[in-house]
Image: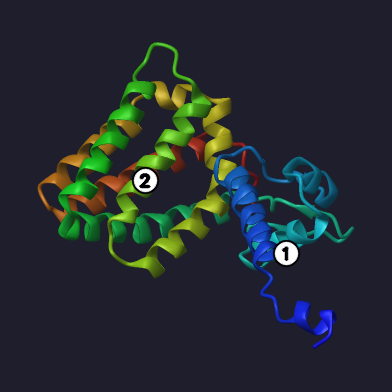
Amino acid sequence: MSSRLALAELPQLERRTLADTAYEALADLLASGRLAPGDRLSLRQSAAALGVSVMPVREAVSRLVADGVLEVAPTRAIRVPIMTARDFRALAETRMAIEGLAAARTAEHRSEAELAAIRRAEAAFRAEAGSAEPDCARAVRLNRDLHFAIYAACGLAPLQEVIARLWLKAGPVINLDLRAHPERLLQGFALQRHAEALVAIEARDGPAAAAALAADIREAADFILSRGGLRDA
C-alpha cells in the first residue's frame, strides 16, 4: 500500500476539531454580544486570532450562515445581520415560547444535582448584578450560564439545540445593549424573574417556571425596544 493511500484512510480528526473549536469561539462572540449587528467578520483576522488556518474558520462561518446568524453581504463580506424591531419582537416571542417550554420541563424533570447547579448559577448572577457597580461583561456571561443551566436540565437535546441557535441570533442585540446600558441590570427585573424561576423549579411547578422565563425575556425585549435603537423594516 502506498503512503498516499494509507494517509487517505486516516480520519480528519484534527480538522473537524479545529472547525468545531472555531464555530464555538465565533458563536460565543455572537451570544455574548461582542459582535454587534452590522459588524463584519474577516476570515483571515479570525483565523489569526484563533491561531489556525483559514479553512476551519471558513467551515465554521458556513455553518453560522446556514444557521442564519451570519450573512453574506452583496459585497461578499461576512457580517452580523442587522435586526429590525419587527424581527426582534418575533424573535422574543419565539424565545418566550421555546425557552418557557424548556423551563417547564426542567421544573418537572430536574434532578437534585441539576437543581444544585441552577442554584449556584442563580446565586452567581445575583451577586454580580446586585453589587453596587456590576461588571456588565461578567453579568452577561453569568446570565447566560444561568439560562443554560436551566435548559440543560430539560432532558430534550433537540430543544436545547434550538435554544442555542435562538441565542446566537438574539445575543448581538440583547447582550450588546446590556453592556451599553447597565441601568437594565440596576432595575432588577432579571434578578426578580430569575428568583421566581428558581423557586418554581424547586417546587417542580412547570407553569410558574415557564411564566418566569417568559417574563424575563419579555421585559428585556421591551426595554431594548423602548431605547429605539432598532430600526423598523
The local secondary structure at tag 2 comes to: helix
**Residue at the extreme top of the image, as rendered:** 132
The local secondary structure at tag 1 comes to: helix
Give the amino acid type for the residue marked by disc 1 in the picture: Glu
**Residue at the extreme right of the image, as rendered:** 75
Q: Earlier in the sequence, mark 1 or mark 2?
A: 1
Asked if one can make out residue 119 in the rendered structure from this viewpoint, the answer is: yes
Residue 136 vs residue 191: left or right? Answer: right
Residue sitting at x 40%, y 41%: 145
When the figure is inspected, residue 85 is found, relative to residue 224, above or below; the finding is below
What residue did someone put label 1 on? 59
**Residue placed most toward the observer, 69 or 12:** 12
Cα separation between marks 1 and 2? 28 Å
Asked if one can make out residue 233 in the rendered structure from this viewpoint, the answer is: no
Q: Give the tally of numbered discs.
A: 2
Q: Residues within 10 Å of mark 2 (few under 14, many from 20)?
A: some
Q: Report the quarter where the C terminus lies.
A: bottom right
**Residue placed most toward the observer, 184 or 118:** 118
Residue sitting at x 37%, y 61%: 98
Q: Residue 35's spot in the image, x, y percent?
A: 67, 41
Residue 79 vs residue 27: left or right? Answer: right
The circle drawn on residue 100 is none
Q: Residue 199's spot in the image, x, y percent?
A: 16, 40
**Residue placed most toward the observer, 14 or 86:** 14
Q: Residue 109's spot in the image, x, y percent?
A: 18, 60
**Residue at the extreme bottom of the image, as rendered:** 1
Q: Residues within 10 Å of mark 1 (few under 14, many from 20)?
A: some
**Residue at the extreme front of the image, as rendered:** 1
Give the amino acid type for the residue marked by disc 2 in the picture: His
What residue did someone put label 2 on? 147
When the figure is inspected, residue 32 is found, relative to residue 63, above or below; the finding is above
